[in-house]
Image: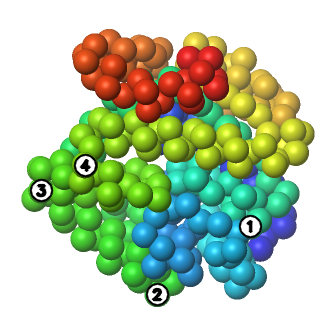
Amino acid sequence: MNSSYQPLILIGAARSGTKLLRDSIACHPHVDKVPYDINYVWKFGNEDIPHDELKIDDLNNAIRTKIASAIDRFSRGSPYIIEKTVSNCLRVPYVASVFPDAKYLHIVRNGFDVIESVARQWTAQPDWQYIFQKALTFPILDAFGYGISYTKKTIQSLWVSDSKNIATWGVRYDGIDEDIKVRNLLEVCAIQWSQSVSKASAGLKNINSENLLLVRYEDFVENPNLVLEKIAEFANIDLSLCLKSTDLGAIRKDEVGKGIRTLTLEQRKSISPIIEKELALFSY
């Protein structure tokens, strides 16, 4: 592992603003980034586990070194590197065992907004530019099984429209395949969010408070400079360079409340029992 940089691990459910926050922070000249989710790296040696909920018992020194070395390749020599694979919500202790000295940013967003957005992603056409970008650096020899599985799912998404047989999008919690068979898509998306938030929160309780900062998506889009100031202080990053470098053009306030506006009352009622505990956890 390259010990010359400080890892910044961004933990957040899919569609919670992880990409937006990562890219905003990585505009800083002293921060490198892993430019896309690398679940295949975090699953090195555990490709046969059909979900993303890896435990510390699934980790050994060889796997730990392999993961850290793969992330090293994205470093360009800056003192920081930020990584944001969303499936890490389900395995924070596993991640912390690989990077025990990392600093953690935990981003949360209103579950209704997240679920509405995630549901659209399940049925969207593949983003070929994104897939091609990942393919250029995909370690085929190290993650051959994962690559085959990902390719099958991508092809499946082109031909299958039935929600009971559609390829999984987002985090794979333990039991997701069974839920897909008996629940509707919106309910599965709600469970994805619920599991991501609850397991991330539980896992982050074991992180030293000095190495953990909570960010609310709604606060970030409302006042990005203020949130970036807090992050800069937390991570000990030069604040003036942080604010000067960040591109705020992609930050939009109109996404806040979109779930409530878009989902029908019946849809909101159907998923509320699934997510009410996690909504309350962060006062949504």
Kind of residue at disc 2: Leu
Kind of residue at disc 4: Val
Looking at the picture, does residue 179 appear above or below residue 131?
above
Which residue is the site of mark 4?
182
Image mark for residue 160: 3
Q: Quadrant of the N terminus?
A: bottom right
Q: Cβ–Cβ below 8 Å for labels 2 and 4?
A: no
Is residue 5 visible in the rendered structure shown here?
A: no
Q: Count residues near mark 3 (Cα–Cα under 10 Å), then give few for <14, some for 14-19, many for 20+.
A: few
Image mark for residue 141: 2
Dot 2 or dot 4, earlier in sequence: 2
Kind of residue at disc 3: Val
| Marks 1 and 2, how far apart at CA | 21 Å
| Marks 1 and 4, how far apart at CA | 36 Å
| Marks 2 and 4, how far apart at CA | 36 Å
Which residue is the site of mark 1?
98
